[in-house]
Image (cartoon, rainbow, N blue to C red):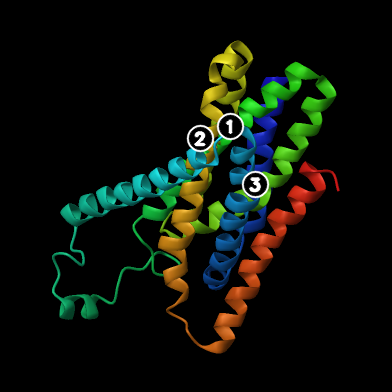
Amino acid sequence: MIIVASLLGGVLSLLVAALLTLNTRASWLSMLVSYAIGALLGAAFLNTLPEAFELSENPTQVTTILLMGILMFFILEKLVLWRHCHLEDCEVHVPPQGLVATAANHNQNGHEHDHGRSGMMIIVGDTFHNFVDGILIAAAFMVDVQLGIVTSIAIIAHEIPQEAGDFVILLNSGYTRRMAFLMNLLSSFATLVGGVLAYFMLHQMDFLILPLLALASSSMIYVAMSDLIPGLHKRPEIKATVQQVALILLGIGTIWLVGDVFVHGH
């Protein structure tokens, strides 16, 4: 039951999210980035961080790991930038007039992309989150089968909007639809790994849940605030700003609504 639920928890939410996002028009991608920002921030502040605080007797422990996680993702992004700079021209090596002439890099949909930086970081954070989901599914089934089923349904439900946001970020980051799907699929198997490991050694793994939740939160916050929001400022006109704010609120609202209905049962 744990293996089946872990596979369904990862793969079902992934398939639904893929159907919602991978068939979208290229022109909608920049709009959907605003929704993805809301979904990421909603998942971090309404989902994973509250779970981490519930597990912690010392809130400073959670915020310290969150802070260290944001710094870790900053360093990770720097490493990717350095690697990219060795492979081709970048801001460090190209004079300003050269940058104006090349007019930034564009992916196959005609949108600016960041050479996979935000996509890679969101996959790392999502893998942490999926691993924790697997542990939670296993723990619930070991208490009661019915509780395990309810927990699995809740996890599938709250993962769909977040996975949809991940797809948008991967596409916006320059990945092809096929690569975005494969990377998310690979990340989703962390749910199965977490579930199986938790079945055999749950008590030894308890200490992992809190730091992994905090690290998953830090990846979502960092990518939303550092990589995605600055791109929205390139369209400062009122109409675009209203649209962006509305879509960010929609992303946050989706996470809140799904969590309220499926996770808390209201």
Q: Quadrant of residue 192?
A: top right
Q: Is residue 182 visible?
A: no
Q: Secondary structure at mark 1?
A: helix
Which residue bears the numbered disc 1? Answer: 132
Q: Nearer the viewer, mark 3 or mark 1?
A: 3
Tell me the CA gap for discs 2 and 1.
7 Å
Task: Identify the residue at horizontal 27%, vertical 52% (top origin).
Answer: 78
Residue 47, numbered circle:
3
Name the amino acid, label 1.
Answer: Val
Image quarter hosting the N terminus: top right
Residue 212, numbered circle:
2
The residue sitting at the top extreme is 200
Q: Left or right: 41 with respect to 149?
A: left
Task: Identify the residue at horizontal 19%, vertical 58% (top origin).
Answer: 88
Tell me the CA gap for discs 3 and 2.
13 Å
Q: Upstream in the sequence, badge 3 or badge 1?
A: 3
Whether 7 is drawn above or below 60: the answer is above
Q: Secondary structure at mark 2?
A: helix
Task: Identify the residue at horizontal 29%, vertical 48% (top origin).
Answer: 75
Q: Residues within 10 Å of mark 2 (few under 14, many from 20)?
A: many
Q: Is residue 249 visible?
A: yes
Location of residue 83 in the rendering, given as x and y in whole percent from the top left corner: 22, 49
Name the amino acid, label 3.
Answer: Asn
Q: Residues within 10 Å of mark 1 (few under 14, many from 20)?
A: many
Q: Left or right: 117 with respect to 220?
A: left
